[in-house]
Image (cartoon, grey):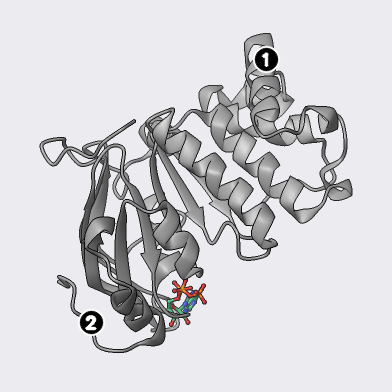
Amino acid sequence: MFMTNPELKPVIDVQHVSKVYDNGTSGLTDINLQVRPGEFVVIVGLSGAGKSTLMRSLNRLHQVTEGRVLIDGQSITEAKGRNLRQLRREVAMIFQNFNLVKQSTVLRNVLAGRLGYYPTWRSSLGLFKDTDKQRAFKALERVNLLDKVYQRVDQLSGGQQQRVAVARAFVQDPKIVLADEPTASLDPKTAHLIMNDLKSMNQDLGKTVVANLHSVALAKEYATRIVGLRAGRIVYDEAIRDVTDTDLTDIYNGGSLTGDGQ
Ligand SMILES: Nc1ncnc2c1ncn2[C@@H]1O[C@H](COP(=O)(O)OP(=O)(O)OP(=O)(O)O)[C@@H](O)[C@H]1O
């Protein structure tokens, strides 16, 4: 099992990050957060607290207004061209709405996880190497979807679609997996399947996981560390062994907090 080691260099280093949207809304204010290899961090907070904004700032789906984010010691905030592509390769993302190409097959969607390894001309032609096809089959076996490999994604259930997204993250073979409310639109049993896939990526493959979750029960069950956001600021940050039920209720209900906020 992978254990967090405070001596390790952070794989994600968020330094004084603020994000103001074009319409003037403040999404994040002066966020500082270091995540070390092997952690499973769950971000919690009320709707509108800034969880998705933070997640999207980590892989530069959002451009931050101030500060910077280092991925494995390199600034993704300032990266350009090839360097940005290489850094993005190290960060896979799983979305609440799956973010798949619905008219395309399961296989093609999973192979999309390898695009960051190809030059642009080759990826635009969709010419994938056999080794990558083998990777995709293996990933689909892992999430128990091998029988759907040539099916169109829009013929699958929501839970199956999210498992395709998980397989896509597997084949990307990143250092970091971000999951933005990955179980929000799924039933409890399927939610556990997805969370177990994330746990396996974390514990068996050593990937660092950062997930936004609305469910207190799932946060408690899977996180090694809980970070609480409120109104765009970090107000709570504790290792799971120090997290009490009262803390969690307070974070989710907006009450007073007892953890080490910043
Ligand atoms: N594209 C946008 N333009 C303007 N403001 C935005 C945009 N996206 C988010 N916001 C605002 O930024 C703040 C943080 O939103 P964010 O979506 O990050 O919160 P969240 O914690 O992920 O919420 P939820 O749990 O509802 O998904 C909110 O005030 C929101 O209204």
Answer few, some or many: residues within 10 Å of disc 2's Cα (few below 14, many 20 plus, some between 14 and 19). some
Q: Which picture quadrant has residue 76?
A: top left
Drawn side of residue 241 relative to residue 51, left or right: left
Q: Quadrant of residue 138?
A: top right
Question: Which residue shows up at 41% across the image and 75% down it?
Answer: 21
111 and 191: which one is in front?
Answer: 191
Amino acid type, mark 2: Leu
Find disc 2 in the rendering and name its residue: 257
Q: Is mark 1 within 8 Å of ligand 1?
A: no
Q: Position of residue 10 (x, y in %)?
A: 20, 42
- Give the percent coordinates (x, y) of residue 174: 44, 32
Q: Is residue 226 left or right of residue 129?
A: left
Quadrant of the rendered structure where residue 129 is? top right
Q: Is 113 drawn above or below residue 50 in the view shown? A: above
In this view, the residue in front, 193 or 85, is: 193
Q: Residue at x 78, y 27 (%)?
A: 146
Q: Earlier in the sequence, mark 1 or mark 2?
A: 1
Query: Along the horizontal axis of the image, is 136 left or right of 241?
Result: right
